[in-house]
Amino acid sequence: MPWRSSNEEQQRRKFCEAALSQKSSFEQLCKSYGIRRQTGHKWLKRLKEEGHKGLKNRSRRPHQLRGARSQQEWKGRVIGLKRRHWSWGPKKLRKVLGKLYGSRNVPSVASLGRWLAKEGLTRRQARRKPGPQQLRAPRIDPRRCNDVWAIDFKGQFQTPKDRRTNYPLTVSDLKSRYLIGCDNLLRPDAKSVIRHLKSYFKEYGLPKAIRCDNGGPFGSNGALGLSKITAWIIKMGIIVDFIDPGKPQQNGIHERIHRTFKAEAANPPAQSCSAQQQRGRKWQKHYNQERPHESLGQKTPAEVYRKSRRKYQGEGPLDHPEANFIRKVRLKGEISFEGRRRYIGEAFSAHKIGLYKIEPSRYEVRFADLILGHLLDADSCGLRPTVLTAKIVQPKPHTSTMC
């Protein structure tokens, strides 16, 4: 009968003793124990060479792993290279090893990282603790023209002739899909963006809100995530509608315009920056006045869009009539308060903020109707952030029955 796995060693001993006594033929003995003749000879050989220890089960692990010598060579190479370049990670090390020794048999990034970790040549970075969560206003649904504009840059690319980097700035109305602006900027800084926004406001009026992402130059790590651009937009009485971080689909309408712009006007780009600007303006006119849009019932955006009735009146001062103190933020984002410099944020430089006393040693800092944070007498630094949402005053609703 076949051997039971729980008593294999004892069965082998009995088989070997019976085989050595030669009371019956070897073939019949193997049949009675349910094993082959080759197996029987194997256990007799092990008994003669190793004694009863040879009847125990052996490990099935190979004596030498396949490619073990090669792995040791690669391990030595990556450790030596790492010690010469301490700041390099497994990806860079693998790339350089491929150039030095050929990229065919270089171990994977995971293997290199595992070897370096075993040798203590890696350093774990401390995970940054998240700051206070900024609760934002709910997403605004564009029900009429100029309810929500979207603004963004369509990446960047270089024109081949003059080798200048172009940053296409696009602004669109999310209700009518009308392309408000399509301009090439040589620098995506706040000064250039604000200059173009002023020209759009003068021509089309003011929207109720502007939707943008959290990255530069529209977002920052400062108070409420505002930058110089979005702080200026708020000063104009316009709501800043930030999308959630890492979710560009929340601005999908504008991203779809970018896809069409790249396919029809920027792939490949024009030879020079001026030629690309002309091409963009021509494409903007085609997109607004000639290209039918499926979501508009095959109408063109120009047939649906109407200018805003909120006219651009210039930049008015921000009043804080109920504030205990009013301070103008300096260029470096600081104010002078109670004989000390307190940091507010560079996004609010050249703007006025209001300080409202809510406790004997605590002041609430506001920009327009936004609560930026608190200043405490006990703090020697700057603004202490707050998780409170800004009390955004909605602009006057549209009285027109147009789109």
Image (spheres, rainbow, N blue to C red):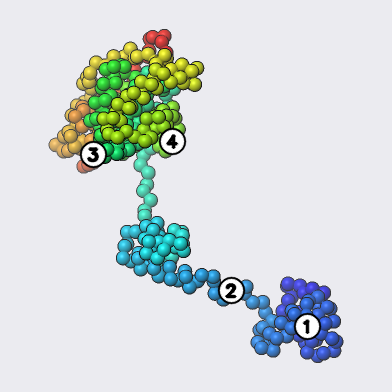
* Residue sitting at x 24%, y 16%: 313
Q: Secondary structure at mark 2?
A: loop
Q: Is residue 173 visible?
A: no
Q: Quadrant of the N terminus?
A: bottom right
* Residue sitting at x 41%, y 14%: 303
Going by the picture, which residue comes out furthest to the bottom? 21
First in sequence: mark 3 or mark 1? 1
First in sequence: mark 2 or mark 1? 1
Pick the residue in front: 180 or 3. Answer: 180
Pick the residue in front: 339 or 277. Answer: 277
In the image, 386: left or right of 341? right
Q: Quadrant of the C terminus?
A: top left
Q: Position of residue 187 (x, y in %)?
A: 25, 35
- The local crowd at label 3, few if under 14, some if 14 to 19, many if 20 or more residues have their Cα within 10 Å, is some
First in sequence: mark 2 or mark 4? 2
In the image, 121: left or right of 44? left
Q: Quadrant of residue 167?
A: top left
Alpha carbon of mark 1 to alpha carbon of mark 4: how far? 72 Å
First in sequence: mark 3 or mark 2? 2
**Pointer 4: what residue?**
247
Q: Secondary structure at mark 4?
A: loop
Q: Of the numbered discs in the image, which one, if any, rests on residue 382? A: 3
Labels 1 & 4 near each other (Cβ < 8 A) = no
Q: Position of residue 203 (x, y in %)?
A: 29, 16
Q: Secondary structure at mark 1?
A: helix
**Pointer 2: what residue?**
62
**Pointer 1: what residue?**
15
Q: Amino acid at mark 1?
A: Phe
- The local crowd at label 1, few if under 14, some if 14 to 19, many if 20 or more residues have their Cα within 10 Å, is some
Q: Amino acid at mark 3?
A: Gly
Q: Quadrant of residue 154?
A: top left
Q: Is residue 133 above or below residue 90?
A: above
